[in-house]
Amino acid sequence: MTLFNSKKATIKTVLALIASLLVCCVGYYAYLMYLNPNIKVEDGDSEFLYVERDDTFEDVLAKLSECSCLRNKETFRQLAILEGYDKHIVPGRYALRNNMHNKRLLRNLQRGYQTPTKITFNNIRTKEQLAQKLSEQLMTDSTEIITLLNNKEYLQTLGLTPDNAVSIFIPNTYEVYWTISAEDLMERMQKEYERFWTKKRRKQAEETGLTRFEISTLASIVEEESNIADEKSTIAGLYINRLHRNMPLQADPTVRFALNDFTIKRVLREHLKTESPYNTYLNCGLPPGPIRIPSIADIDAVLNYERHNYLYMCAKEDLSGRHAFASSFSEHQRNAVRYRKSLNKLNIYK
């Protein structure tokens, strides 16, 4: 009887040890699955996982494998399936931080806890360029942006038209979510546009006699005319003088825009005949919208335009990029002759 009890006790002890061992194994595996650091980032503190709108669970796994961030792919896979993530993928831009564990990563992915991204755009001439630049930085497709920029009914709700819609895109750096929709982006840019037009800038605009949209349009012409910062307020003053006298602006950059050919170095008489509301040789006043997205510096150059009597300008014959300004047409003609001679010497005829 004693021997039987001893054997029974031994069996119980072995079973208890096995059970304890199983609990430890399960606990350890649960630790590996949930809380063990499973993200390894080689350079810097984090990388980013971009989950597209149409991505599947296998796509997400493939992207994690491609960036070589997952130490143990299988534990993440099993936890994701256990938590139901494989059936509900949320698009977004997610930070993969060094030593992040599966539970934290999965929580972010399931709940759409994205890390904002910074978007920038500058040196943009056309809607197509703008849409392409934005689509390169966001999940939103360029065609979605173009569609809104040309949608009269939608733009009307924002107080915009297809011609002036790009005016609300003030070149700067903005923090947004990578998944922001085209509509939300437009609304965000409009808010930034209103924020940009401070009380001081609004007052300056009133003093020019131009609306805010007209200021942007004139600034776009000024920016196309010169890369010389200290000339811009002078050029702005010249065009404002012409506007106040109801004279056509006769700005060569508007002709290039009308032709959609920005490679033209020498605007010829045949170019000036181009039928377009953007051709300021054929039409008085400003074009219906900007011929590029003007920088903040160029908008401010118009708002702080130089008061003078200049009505004419021509590139200097030294081809330095600077301009010769004139108050009379006869003086302007002399400047133009010198400039044309310089172009002829270099065989620049178009």
Image: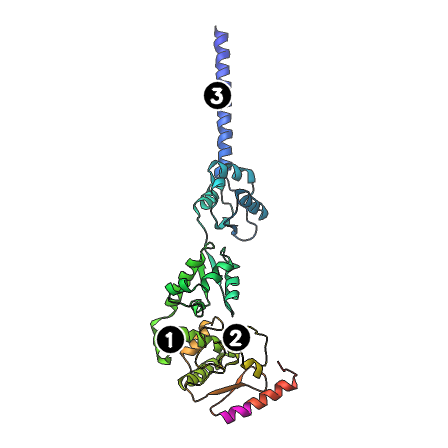
Query: Mark 3 and mark 1 in contact (Cβ < 8 Å)?
Result: no
Colour logic: rainbow
Q: Looking at the image, is mark 3 or mark 2 earlier in the sequence?
A: 3
SS of the residue under disc 2: helix
Percent across and percent down for residue 120 are 49, 63
Per the picture, the main secondary structure of the magenta-coloured stretch is helix
Query: Mark 1 and mark 2 in contact (Cβ < 8 Å)?
Result: no
Percent across and percent down for residue 291 are 49, 73
Which residue lies at the image location 50% right of the left edge and 63% below the top edge? Answer: 131
Q: Is residue 18 above or below residue 160?
A: above
Mark in the foreground, 1 or 3: 1
Magenta stretch: give its range: 329-335
Image check: 339 left or right of 312?
right
For label 2, the crowd category at 10 Å Cα-Cα, with few meaning under 14, some 14 to 19 and many 20 or more, is: many
> 170 or 147: nearer the eye?
147
In the image, residue 332 lies in the stretch drawn in magenta:
yes
Q: Which residue is mark 3?
A: 16
Q: Which residue is mark 1?
A: 211
Q: Which residue is mark 2?
A: 258
Q: Residue furthest top?
A: 1
- Amino acid on which the number 2 mark rests in the picture: Ala
Which residue lies at the image location 48% right of the left edge and 25% below the top edge? Answer: 20
Q: Looking at the image, is mark 1 or mark 3 earlier in the sequence?
A: 3
Which residue lies at the image location 51% right of the left edge and 19% below the top edge? Answer: 14
Q: How many marks?
A: 3
For label 3, the crowd category at 10 Å Cα-Cα, with few meaning under 14, some 14 to 19 and many 20 or more, is: few
SS of the residue under disc 1: loop
Which residue lies at the image location 50% right of the left edge and 81% below the top edge? Answer: 251
Q: Looking at the image, is mark 2 or mark 1 earlier in the sequence?
A: 1
- Amino acid on which the number 1 mark rests in the picture: Thr
Q: Quadrant of the C terminus?
A: bottom right
- Amino acid on which the number 3 mark rests in the picture: Ala
